[in-house]
Each structure stands twice: as structure tokens, then as C-alpha cells.
Image: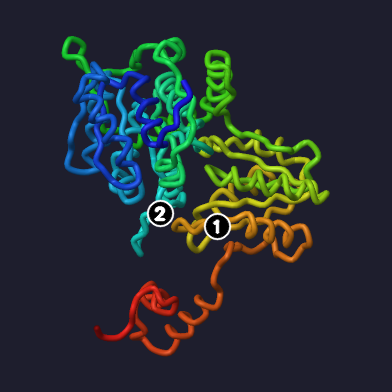
């Protein structure tokens, strides 16, 4: 059924249709609307057979889901930014225990300085926590990825994050085709846990493991991620057969057939990227795009195959490893190891800065004309003069003050002097 609906409400509906038995969450912008909606539906009985747990923190939210999933209940939570970091210890516990929890991450920047707007620094910081990470390009895809995520999590007994851009998607109203309960029931079978706590058959979940078996347990976590590289495409194909719409998968190519330059990106920015690709095509420049739908596990072979015909690759990402470089860019270079393809790594959209068609068009023109050095990390629309002023200020003395406050004053955003 096609509805004009906010992204958060659409995701809440998708989760409801998956019949969760326990939802435990703590509010943090911009994911709050999702769990508010689910809480209200549990209260009214619209979401029947589900217990909604009000907890004191994000750490408590995921800890409760670990307990409920360990007891054999289909479990769900959601978070964002610092909330995800507050869950860090529990994230590793959930994956190490092999618990099929599904979590929405409404991607938001990590402070300091505090920032509530969108980038991917939160989920990227947890990329090695053992959770599968799926990225939605639109609210339609966010709905469909949640339905697929429950099936994936429960097939492999592994936790899954569905990442959607905070505010850009969560608070956007657009037409979304919401499936029926009958469709979801046909696609997602009742939850049968691979492990569960039962007083009639007592076992220990989370026993201490010493050096004699710890490496083997960790290897099995890796093995499940590798198995997901086969399972995710199968689930995507089954989804298309059930719902009549192609969604999910590992990567999604756009105009790659004869592309000399390919743009790699994750999330909602693909919409803008694809429009600029179309514009470049109209100018006679052979551009294409590759959406990374699954970032963890990293689909190395699929990325290599998709990009093997390109002369150059431009990775546009909304996070980076401070002191090292791009995160998605490093993974892309790994996939292209041994090939002559030039890889340009560009960080864009940090803290919610708009990624405009004009900026991308200029960036892509610089790449084609070889005006950028592929060995360096580039920052789209970086105010170099602002940075240089602050560096000069910091070099003048030890008491130069906080960088963020200084640069905001330079921009005239914060009034300086006494009031």
C-alpha cells in the first residue's frame, strides 16, 4: 500500500510487521520517532504479543535485547551516534554470543564538538564489532532492508544493523509502498532460535573461554560474516519474488557497462550521485556509480568485479579514520589490489554538511582532468582558509583556546567578547 509517510514511521511499520516479541530502546535523536511509534503501538495493542521495555540508557537497551534474544524472543532496538557508542561493550557481547538482534542505526555524527546531523561516523566506528551492516539509500529501501534483516539475522544467528541516514531519511516524508502483514508473514517465518535459555534444558550462554578455544570462537564469528555474503543475495532474490520489487543485496550498480569513472558511496547520497552521473553522461563523459548496500561483511569479490573495468574510482564517504584516511576507500583499495585502477578518496557531508550536485560535478571534473592526487585524502568543500587561520592561531601560543569555538567566531556564528 502506497502511503505518504515519514521515514521513521515507515520503519516502525516495517518492524511491527516483522512481529517482534521484545523491543527495548532509549530515545536519542534522530531515531526517537521510530521507538516512540513502536511504543505507542504496543500500548494500544496494535502491535500485539510484544513487550516494550523502558530502560535507563542505550547500554541497558541492548543489554535487555541480549537477555530477551538469549531467551528465544525476536528482539529489536534502535539508536544513533553517542547512543551506539554507549552500547559498544554490549555490541561485542551480542555478536560474540551469536544473537540475532536487529537494530536500526539512524546515522548521526559523533562529538565532540556535539553535532546532531547526519554522517556515518557512528556505525563506521563499530564496523569491527561483528554486526552485519546494511545501508539504505531511501526510505523505501529502509523498510525493505528491515524485513530482510530479521530473516538474515535469524538464518545465521548473527546481529544485524540497518543503517539509514539521520534526518535525511528518518524525518523525510515521501511515498513509501508498505507491504501487507500477509506478505511479510510469507517471507519471514516464525522465529526458531538456534540457542535459547530454558530451565527444562539448562545451558550456559556466554561462558568464559580461555586461550584454548577463544580464537576458534572468534573465527566462527568471521565465518558467519563470510556466510552472509552468500545468504544476503539469496534473501534479496526471495524478497523480489515475494514482493515484486528488487531490493537489498551486496552492491547495486548504476550505469556501469562502459563507465571509465565509477563513484562508490553508501546511503542516501546515492540519489544525488546518480543525478550527477546522468549529467556527466549527457556531457559525453562515461560515468557510473556503485552503491554499497552491505558494508559488513565487505563484499570484496563483488566490488572487484563491478569496478574491474573502470580506469578510476571515486569513493565518496561520510566518515574517515582520523590519522589514516578513508574507511570505505581503504576497503575499496583492498578489493582492487593488483589492478591498475586509480582510487580517489573523498570525505564529504561530515556533520550534515550538504553534498550538492554542483560540488560533486566539480569534484568529478577535477578527477577526470587529473587535477587531484589519488594518493591523498580529499575533503569536499573544506574551508581551507578557516582551517589555516586556526592553525596559525594555535601556533602563536599555548593558550589559543578551543578550535571549535574559535572557528565558529571566525564564521560569525558565535558572538565574541563580553555581553
Q: Is residue 121 above or below residue 244?
A: below
Q: In the structure shown, which secondary structural element does the residue marked by tag 2 occupy?
A: loop
Please say if the residues under marks 1 and 2 sit with CB atoms less than 8 Å apart.
Answer: no
Look at 39% across and 89% down and name the residue there: 397
Look at 67% across and 42% down and name the residue there: 289
| Residue 117: numbered disc | 2
Mark 2 neighbour class, 10 Å CA radius: few under 14, some 14 to 19, many 20 or more: many
Residue 81 drawn at (x, y percent): 36, 49
Q: Is residue 12 above or below residue 360?
A: above
Residue 360 lies in quadrant: bottom right
Mark 1 neighbour class, 10 Å CA radius: few under 14, some 14 to 19, many 20 or more: many
Residue 57 lies in quadrant: top left
Which mark is nearer the camera, 1 or 2? 2
Quadrant where the C terminus sits is bottom left
Look at 69% across and 39% down and name the residue there: 304
Residue 193 drawn at (x, y percent): 33, 16
Q: In the rendered view, does 386 fall on the left or right side of 416? A: right
Q: Nearer the viewer, residue 147 or 336?
A: 147
| Residue 46: numbered disc | none
How many marks the image carries: the answer is: 2
Q: Residue furthest front?
A: 4
Residue at mark 1: 348
Q: In the structure shown, which secondary structural element does the residue marked by tag 1 occupy?
A: loop
Q: Nearer the viewer, residue 128 or 268?
A: 268
Residue 97 drawn at (x, y percent): 33, 29
Residue 172 drawn at (x, y percent): 44, 42
Amino acid at each position: 500500500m502506497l502511503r505518504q509517510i515519514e521515514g521513521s514511521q515507515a520503519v516502525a511499520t516495517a518492524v511491527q510487521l516483522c512481529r517482534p516479541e521484545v523491543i527495548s530502546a532509549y530515545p536519542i535523536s534522530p531515531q526517537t520517532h521510530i521507538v516512540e511509534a513502536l511504543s505507542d503501538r504496543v500500548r494500544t495493542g496494535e502491535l500485539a504479543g510484544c513487550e516494550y521495555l523502558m530502560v535507563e540508557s542505550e547500554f541497558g537497551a541492548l543489554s535487555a535485547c541480549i537477555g530477551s534474544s538469549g531467551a528465544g524472543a525476536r528482539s529489536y532496538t534502535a539508536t544513533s551516534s553517542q547512543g551506539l557508542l554507549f552500547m559498544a561493550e554490549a555490541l561485542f557481547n551480542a555478536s560474540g554470543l551469536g544473537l540475532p538482534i536487529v537494530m536500526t542505526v539512524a546515522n548521526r555524527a559523533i562529538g565532540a564538538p556535539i553535532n546532531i546531523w547526519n554522517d556515518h561516523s557512528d556505525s563506521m566506528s563499530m564496523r569491527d564489532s561483528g554486526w552485519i551492516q546494511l545501508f539504505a539509500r531511501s526510505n523505501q529501501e529502509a523498510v525493505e532492508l528491515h524485513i530482510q534483516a530479521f530473516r538474515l539475522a535469524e538464518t545465521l544467528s548473527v546481529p544485524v544493523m540497518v543503517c539509514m541516514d539521520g534526518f535525511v531519511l528518518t524525518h523525510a516524508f515521501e511515498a513509501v509502498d508498505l507491504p501487507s502483514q500477509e506478505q511479510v508473514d510469507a517471507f519471514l517465518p516464525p522465529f526458531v532460535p538456534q540457542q535459547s535459555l530454558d530451565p527444562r534444558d539448562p545451558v550456559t550462554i556466554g561462558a568464559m573461554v580461555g586461550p584454548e578455544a577463544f580464537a576458534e570462537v572468534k573465527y566462527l564469528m568471521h565465518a558467519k560474516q563470510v556466510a552472509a555474503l552468500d545468504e544476503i543475495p539469496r534473501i534479496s532474490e526471495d524478497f523480489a519474488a515475494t514482493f515484486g520489487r528488487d531490493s537489498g543485496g551486496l552492491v547495486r550498480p548504476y550505469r556501469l557497462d562502459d563507465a571509465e569513472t565509477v563513484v562508490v558511496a553508501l546511503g542516501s547520497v546515492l540519489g544525488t550521485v546518480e543525478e550527477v552521473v546522468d549529467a556527466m553522461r549527457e556531457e559525453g563523459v562515461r560515468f557510473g556509480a556503485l552503491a554499497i548496500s552491505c558494508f559488513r561483511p565487505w563484499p570484496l569479490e563483488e566490488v572487484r568485479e563491478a569496478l574491474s573495468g573502470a580506469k578510476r574510482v571515486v569513493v565518496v564517504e561520510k566518515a574517515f579514520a582520523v590519522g589514516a584516511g578513508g574507511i570505505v576507500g581503504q576497503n575499496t583499495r583492498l578489493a582492487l589490489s593488483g589492478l591498475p585502477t586509480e582510487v580517489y578518496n573523498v570525505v564529504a557531508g561530515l556533520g550534515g554538511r550538504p553534498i550538492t550536485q554542483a560540488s560533486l560535478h566539480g569534484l568529478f571534473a577535477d578527477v577526470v582532468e587529473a587535477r587531484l592526487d589519488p594518493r591523498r585524502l580529499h575533503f569536499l568543500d573544506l574551508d581551507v582558509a578557516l582551517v589555516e587561520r586556526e592553525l596559525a592561531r594555535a601556533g602563536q601560543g599555548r593558550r589559543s583556546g578551543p578550535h571549535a569555538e574559535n572557528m565558529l567566531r571566525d564564521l560569525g556564528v558565535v558572538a565574541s567578547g563580553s555581553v
